[in-house]
Image: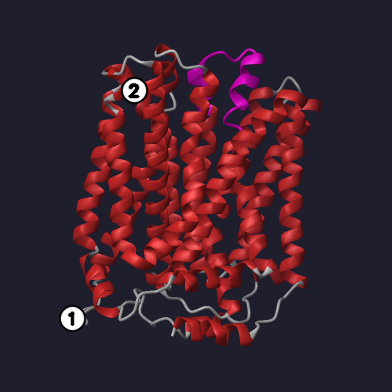
Amino acid sequence: MSSFKGMKGKDDFMKNVDESEYSIEYPDSDTPTLTKLRLMVLTMCLSIFSTNLVSSMCAPFYPRSAAHHGLDSDVTGTILGVYYATTVLASPFMAIFLTKIGQANLLQLGLVLVGTSSLVFGGIDKVDSSLTFGIISFVLRGLQGVGCAATDTAVFAIASSRFTKHLGKVNSYLNSCMGVSFMLGPPVGGILYSWTNFSLPFLLSALLCFVSIVLVNFVFRNLRESKLASDNHVVSTKVVFTKSWHLFSNVRFLCILVTAMFGTACTSFLDPTLSPYLSRQGYNDTAFIGIFYMVRDVAFTLGTPPVGWLIDTWKWNPNGVLLSGAIVAGVGYAIIGVAGVYLPTAITARICIALIFIGVGQAPVFSATLPAMVEEAAALGLKRDDESCGILAALQNFAFYGGLWAGSVVSGAVTYYYGFPICTGIFGGAVVVVALVHANIHVFCRKRITYQSLENLEMLQD
């Protein structure tokens, strides 16, 4: 299929990248060893795991504590949801901060925000006032979202700008750790809360963030020194906005973002709707309901590493992998909707099959989006420098967390009026339609590079 073939413009893009696996000039001209490269990947994986564990760990027990303090369920939902909202709003600005302070410093800043806010969060259970408890919770969750935006932008910028030959594999490892954090967060948080108290889950997540800070400071020391030694000029905000506009003016690049947003919405669409639907069908055991979610998360976690091999080793086009994943996830939702109408009794079987489809489909969506964006930037002729990779990472976070936030908000609203099976079927069909439109635009709408605009961009950078 043509969607799996290489794209023109990629060779021009790669001319701006060193041939080494880790393209960076060190002050002492010392190229990292394979052991240190693996330690870098491990550090980035731990950073992603730590920040995303914070967002999922409090789900089993925070609503109960909030109710004990007199907060309504809609207020609790707003407090938990502000994490995604602030991540979406903060992500575009992280590309600017990255050019000012560097990738490693931005990574540490994000971990400090998440770790400190989690540490403070562990003590708010002692607050007696409902209003004070709600305000502090809202502010701290917002700070955690900003910290997550900084951490994710820095990590994926490092992956795309440094690991030039193995971006697919490194990206898949990072997303696997994200999936593990979503999978382990709720049960670990619930167990720690039941064994001890409100504080321990937050103290554990804060400890992981602080350990990650120490590792980042040690492992990426050369990266920080190189940033200070190699930058003879400060990248202006105007350059970041100009490069961003150059990407947004390409309809193919926009299609990647929209497909990624719909694909990641598949993760959160079921969060506020599946549990009430199963309860209405007689499934009242929360542990059993949690197993359904774990089926999806396990399928996602196991499905991400093969995606990296498809992109790096077998040279599959990331756009084709992304589209395939979105279609598979959409089919999973369609199974829930269609089977809910024609097979209303086989609930356990059809939900499990559908969740496996959704989890397997989400793996290519999360793992292939950044490589697809990198290749589209190649076709547009952008240099693979720190600010370009920072912009791509920030836009990926904007699409991912925008989809996560929109999926939960939209699903709760439309399911209330139209019912669970119908809404899931319609949503699955919409995801498939978006992927097919993307495929057609990818094949038939090849926008030519405007060399005049590229020349103006190079003059602006100089």
Q: Is residue 172 above or below residue 79?
A: below
Q: Quadrant of residue 163?
A: bottom left
Horizontal side, residue 3 vs residue 460: left or right = right
Q: Which residue is mark 1?
A: 28
How far apart are labels 2 and 1 at the CA level?
A: 48 Å
User: Where does the image place residue 119, in percent across and percent down from the top left?
Assistant: 26, 34
> What residue is rendered at 69% in x and 38% in y?
333
Q: Closer to the camera, 384 or 270?
A: 384
Instruction: Say whether residue 212 is visible.
Output: yes
Which stretch appears magenta? 269-291
Q: Which residue is mark 2?
A: 191
Numbered mark located on residue 243 in the image: none
Q: Closer to the camera, 127 or 368?
A: 127
Total labels drawn: 2
Give the color scheme: rainbow, by chain, secondary structure or one colour.
secondary structure
How many other residues sit within 10 Å of disc 2, few (<14), some (14-19) or many (≥20)? some
User: Where does the image place residue 359, in percent across and percent down from the top left?
Assistant: 57, 42
Helix or strand or loop: what does disc 2 sit on? helix
